[in-house]
Amino acid sequence: METCSRTKLIVVGRKIFNEDSGMTRSYVLLTPGPLTTDLAVRRAMLRDWGSRDKSFINLSRDVQSRLSALAQAAASHVCVPLQGSGTFAVEAMISSLMSDQSRSLILVNGAYGRRMAEICRRLGRAFDIYETAEHEPPKAQDIDRILAENSAITHVLMVHCETTSGILNPLSEIAEIVKRHRRELLLDAMSSFGGIEIDLGALGITALAASSNKCLESVPGVSFVLCRHDALEKAQGNSRSLSLDLYDQWCGFKNNGQWRFTPPVQVIAALSKALDLLDAEGGVATRHARFRQNTDILINGMRALGFSTFLDDPLQSPIIVTFRPLPHPNFDARIFTQGLERRGFIIYPGKLTTEESFRIGCIGNITPSTMARVIAAAKSTLKDDMGIVGSSTSSV
Ligand SMILES: *Cc1c(COP(=O)(O)O)cnc(C)c1O
């Protein structure tokens, strides 16, 4: 194989990673999405497609069935894609699968749980909030009790990986309780789908919402809801929004395979290629193992530099890590972020409501070797940009 001298090929699992640079990659994105994508994914967008082309309709149908299959749900759940970012899918899921007679219990421990509450408020859908601190998962026994005591609650809404902190909420425990109480579970699996295995049928989940540009490692522009057949059948007339009506969107696909409104054709082509790459890597389990390795290298390296993580290790997802500022008088989070950017890495500020923090993502087309370079860049930023040498707390 011939490679350009600026391109480094790295093999992880069964996949070859093309650590390209220059024109094709300006920065490594260590963010909650959009993320670093493979060059092949971006290249898949180089042609025009008509929305009624047979070839596009087939491509779109194939992407839909592959997305359902990723959640072991090819038979039980329908994939309804939507134009737009992940929030569009969450809003479509809530507005279409709940009715004016529904009442939801929303589990909140971060910004995305709060966003679901805001969506319900705007839609005028009844809801109760069960809130825990941003470093605490919802307690199964509390949910059990609340559902037992409140027969009016028809739906439970939860976030799988709350990207605000990186906490992985206990999906199977909660799903089991919701199923036992015969309520419907609507899941925001935006930052976990494709990177953490989810068996929709076994968990009895009514629907989940996710998007193209997180663990699926494609470009932004399309989101989707995987929805149990019978729930979708009953959804006619629920949505007061035309464009976010999952039922109508689904009917479009059922009738002629076409999108109701202009589809993001290149984005679907990119997603199709990204799904090829997921298969080539060995599927969700292999990708999960890579993200876990990325996370371990990141956390160990940052701890060696004196940083601490916001979450206890058992709660930490392999998706994104929240770090506290270094307890050193010279440390400045802005200089740290800018220093990493000059060295080729984009990280994001924290999103916690209670304390200063910053976040580094572990997902996207990046490998343990990328994470090792991040640690080297962090070390050099501390030393060269802030005069911090060695481990933290021994202040100057
Ligand atoms: C990214 C994300 C969303 C959706 O965000 P968009 O900016 O609309 O794509 C929703 N929930 C979670 C948990 C997320 O990580």
Image (spheres, rainbow, N blue to C red):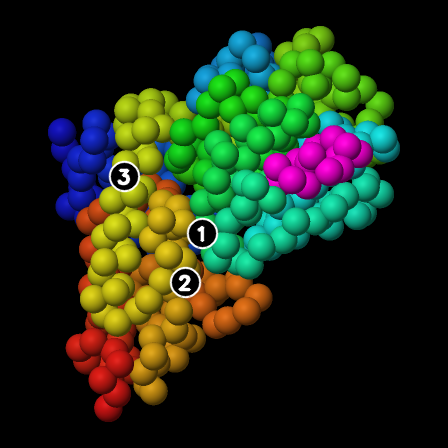
Q: Which residue is mark 2?
A: 310
Callout 2, which amino acid?
A: Phe
Secondary structure of the residue carrying numbered label 2: loop
Q: Which residue is mark 3?
A: 290
Count residues near mark 1 (Cα–Cα under 10 Å), then give few for <14, some for 14-19, many for 20+. many
Percent of width and height locating residue 244: 74, 32
Quadrant housing the N terminus: top left
Q: Nearer the viewer, mark 1 or mark 3?
A: 1
Look at the picture and state if 366 lies above or below 72. Answer: below
Residue 307 located left or right of residue 138: left
* Marks 1/2: CA–CA distance: 9 Å
Q: Residue at x 81, y 19 (%)?
A: 236
Q: Which of the two discs, 3 and 2, labels the residue nearer the N terminus?
A: 3
What label sits on residue 24 in the rendered view?
Answer: none
**Relative to the observer, which residue lies in front, 35 or 391?**
391
**Relative to the observer, which residue lies in front, 82 or 286?**
286
Q: Which of the two discs, 1 and 3, labels the residue nearer the N terminus?
A: 1
The answer to whether mark 1 and mark 2 are in CB contact below 8 A is: yes
Q: Nearer the viewer, mark 3 or mark 2?
A: 2
Asked whether residue 132 is drawn in magenta, I would say no
Magenta stretch in the rendered image: 143-156
* Marks 1/3: CA–CA distance: 17 Å
Q: Residue at x 61, y 50 (%)?
A: 108
Callout 3, which amino acid?
A: Arg
Secondary structure of the residue carrying numbered label 3: helix
Callout 1, which amino acid?
A: Gly
Q: Which residue is mark 1?
A: 166
Residue 247 located left or right of residue 20: right
Asked whether residue 148 is drawn in magenta, I would say yes
Percent of width and height locating residue 77: 58, 17
